[in-house]
Amino acid sequence: MKKSDFLYPRHSYHGEVQPENLVFNANLQEFSTRVNYICGLATNGKLSSQNAYQQIKANWKQLKQSKKQLCIRSASDNVE
């Protein structure tokens, strides 16, 4: 296994193949990686819990904004 594959795992997309879905999937995987690093830093005492929370919250807002910009609808949006 290559070091980069271990540190930055990527998984193939399983869904309706559209450019905006693929971009959002990449953004979602990036979010997941960042949260993992932030949690690791907080767990090891390198980052305060409050700082970790703020960073995760900022990353979440960024992910939500990308979803909005890409016009991605969630499964619950389709339920009437």
Image (cartoon, rainbow, N blue to C red):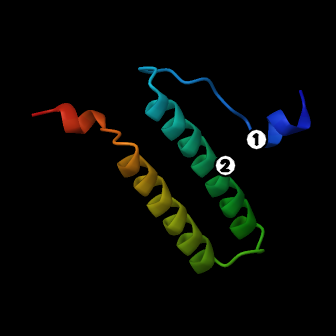
Q: Nearer the viewer, residue 72 or 1?
A: 72
Report crowding for label 2: few under 14, some 14 to 19, many 20 or more residues within 10 A (C-alpha). Answer: some
Q: Which residue does the image show at 15% across and 32% down from the upper left? A: 79
Residue to which mark 2 is pinned: 33
Q: Which residue does the image show at 40% across and 43% down from the upper left? A: 70
Q: Residue 79 got which mark? A: none
Report crowding for label 1: few under 14, some 14 to 19, many 20 or more residues within 10 A (C-alpha). Answer: few
Which callout, 2 or 1, points at the residue further toward the start of the chain? 1
Q: Residue furthest left?
A: 80
Q: Nearer the viewer, residue 48 or 12?
A: 12
User: Which residue type does callout 1 highlight?
Assistant: Tyr
Q: Which residue does the image show at 62% across and 47% down from the upper left? A: 30
Q: Secondary structure at mark 2?
A: helix
Residue 53 position in % (x across, y down): 55, 71
| Tag 2 and tag 1, C-beta contact below 8 Å | yes
- 65 is higher (above) or lower (below) than 1: below
Q: Residue furthest right?
A: 2
Residue to which mark 1 is pinned: 8
Residue 50 position in % (x across, y down): 57, 79
